[in-house]
Image: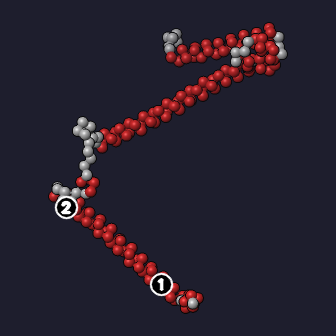
Amino acid sequence: MDLDFITGIGWRDVVLVLAAMVGVYLVLSLMRLFQVVGKRRDGEKREAKRRLSGWEIYPPQEARVTPQVPPSVPVASEPDFARELAKSNTEVELERLRRESAQLREEVARLAEEIALLKATRNVSPLYNEAMTLAQQGMPAAGIAGHCGISIGEAELVASLARSGSEFERQERGEERDERHTDTGNRFHG
């Protein structure tokens, strides 16, 4: 019996039912749209009356509820809030830049140490590169001799070269810094 009912419905009936459903949907949508537009117009009319008269006839819902603020706590005005917000954003940015600066300083110090090691090993025979590296790391001459298979005298010489090279580098950097920051007055002015 159910099959007779389903087979009795044609395409024309299905299209008519769908058209009726679309029509009902459109009518309901238009009604909701008119309600929204009507509420907006009522709100605009109330706002216009309030502005013209200087009095609020129907205050908005937000204005009816007053916040309970203790009298000892001042309420910040908008410019103060904006200023504080900008100040806090600036402080956050400043802190981020300080962290980045510290990281960059660490990186520069590490690279300076590597450059010093490379300069020291550049002037040494390839046979003694490992010994020079160990000496710069602070290993004693006996340890260098045992590790690299060289005599203790050679290891002491390499350690001495490593110490004097690092002292020379520090002294050179100090003199450069002094020359940049001071004027000796010994220059010829002609």
Structural distance between the alpha carbons of marks 2 and 1:
48 Å
Residue 68 horizontal/vertical position (percent): 26, 45
Task: Determine whether, in the image, residue 137 is placed left or right of residue 2.
Answer: right
At 56% from the left edge and 29% from the top edge, which residue is drawn?
104
The answer to whether residue 185 is left or right of residue 142 is: left
**Residue 40 in the image: x percent, y percent?**
29, 65
What SS does tag 2 mark?
helix
Q: Nearer the viewer, mark 2 or mark 1?
A: 1
Please indicate whether residue 48 sits to the left or right of residue 81 in the image.
left
The answer to whether residue 10 shows anywhere in this view is no
Residue 7 image position (x, y, % from top left): 57, 90
* Mark 2 surroundings within 10 Å by alpha-carbon count, few (fewer than 14), some (14 through 19), many (20 or more): some
The figure's colour scheme reads: secondary structure
Eyeballing the image, is 46 above or below 69? below
The residue that mark 2 highlights is: 49
Quarter-wise, where is residue 177 in the image?
top right
Query: What is the quadrant of residue 167 in the picture?
Result: top right
Vertical side of 166 occupied by 100: above or below: below
Image mark for residue 114: none
- Say which residue appears at 22% left-offset and 62% top-offset: 46
24 or 177: nearer the viewer:
24
Between 122 and 90, the residue placed more toward the observer is 90
Asked if residue 26 is positioned above or below residue 43 in the image, the reply reads below
Q: Position of residue 49 (x, y in %)?
A: 19, 61
Amino acid marked by disc 1: Val
| Mark earlier in primary sequence (2, 1) | 1
Q: Secondary structure at mark 1?
A: helix
What residue does disc 1 label?
Answer: 17
